[in-house]
Amino acid sequence: MIGKQVHHYKILEKLRSGGVGGVYLAEDTKLERKVALKFISENLTADEDFVKRYEREAKAIAKLNHTNIVTIHELGEFESKLYAALEYIERQSLDKLIKNESLSIEDTDETIFLLHFQLDSDNLKV
């Protein structure tokens, strides 16, 4: 996928992959900004119930405006895969902070709520 053009997004690098699909860093060539493209695997894209739930959740999240909630720019389809173009936030994952023991006591006192399509330590950014 690296170097591939997905509509007006050019994929720059793979950020992570998981059970739902993969996330790529991309450049929005129209607006000249970095975005995260989250692709849903083909087997889940074929599941009508999953697609309906995914779109419903995306619409709900898109209506929210908060500094700790990633912005959804677009939902689309490319080569039989659903994708979401998301705000790209360049931060270190909570998982890495914990592993590197670079999370201070003061930082742990703050509660950060981030909404995403799946919630796990790789998706939490501080």
Image: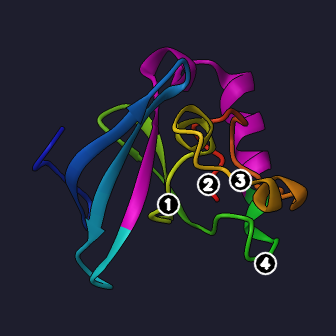
Give the CA separation, mark 1 to mark 3: 22 Å
Give the CA separation, mark 4 to mark 1: 19 Å
Q: Where is residue 119, by image quadrant?
A: top right
Q: Earlier in the sequence, mark 2 or mark 1?
A: 1
Q: Earlier in the sequence, mark 3 or mark 2?
A: 3
Q: Confirm whether the magenta stretch covers residue 69.
A: no
Closer to us: 98 or 84: 98
Residue identified by numbered label 1: 91
Q: Earlier in the sequence, mark 4 or mark 3?
A: 3
Closer to us: 34 or 8: 34
Residue identified by numbered label 4: 65
Range drawn in magenta: 35-58
Left-right relation of 34 to 46: left
Q: Are marks 2 and 1 in contact (CB under 8 Å)?
A: yes
Q: Amino acid at mark 2?
A: Lys
* Quarter of the picture holding the N terminus: top left
